[in-house]
Amino acid sequence: MPYLNIKVSGEPSQAICEDVARTLTSLTAELLGKKPELTAVVVESVPVGRWFIGGASLASKDTSSFYLEIKITCGTNTKQQKAEYIRAIFSAMEGLLGKQDEASYIVIHEVNADAWGYQGMTQEYRFIAASNSVGGKL
């Protein structure tokens, strides 16, 4: 049940935004094992004149940029999975959006299972309920 918020420089078309959302959903499922049907993606655009790297706006550079924040449940992925995910996302964004500035960031926030959820239930509650329903012990 990840939540992804990506900011991209410039004014991408609706088609590009849809491609970004599909790509993020697909890579999140493939590399982090998250359910696509529970993956929420928000794509926001920032004018290049309002995006600065090293004090210079992207309007003066030959690159574009993005900033992705993803929230996942703490402890559900390994360091190796997260590192591969970050590599794959950067590569995919270059494929979709063109040359990206090296200062294009991906931040994975790991949120405690008792601190977030969906459909009115925390992830911790879901884990406990599933464990109890199969006769498991915590």
Image: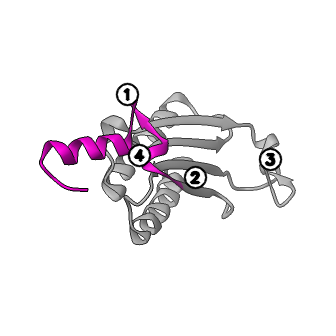
From mark 2 to mark 1, how far is it between C-alphas? 37 Å
Q: Give the secondary structure at mark 3.
A: helix
Mark 4 lies on residue? 23
Q: Residue at x 81, y 41 (%)?
A: 50
* Residue 81 coordinates in the image, percent (x, y): 39, 66
Asked whether the beta carbons under mark 3 and mark 1 sit within 8 Å of each other, the answer is: no
From mark 4 to mark 2, how far is it between C-alphas? 15 Å
Kind of residue sitting beneath label 2: Gly
Q: Earlier in the sequence, mark 3 or mark 2?
A: 3
- Magenta extent: 109-138
Kind of residue sitting beneath label 4: Thr
Kind of residue sitting beneath label 3: Ala
Instruction: Identify the image quadrant of the N terminus.
Output: top left
- Please name the colour scheme applied to the rendered image: one colour
Q: Which mark is residue 59?
A: 3
Q: Earlier in the sequence, mark 4 or mark 1?
A: 4
Mark 2 lies on residue? 98
Between circles 4 and 3, the one closer to the viewer is 4
Q: Residue at x 42, y 67 (%)?
A: 84
Q: Which mark is residue 119?
A: 1
Q: Residue at x 49, y 60 (%)?
A: 91
Task: Choose between 115 and 45: the one closer to the eye.
Answer: 115
Q: Give the secondary structure at mark 2.
A: loop
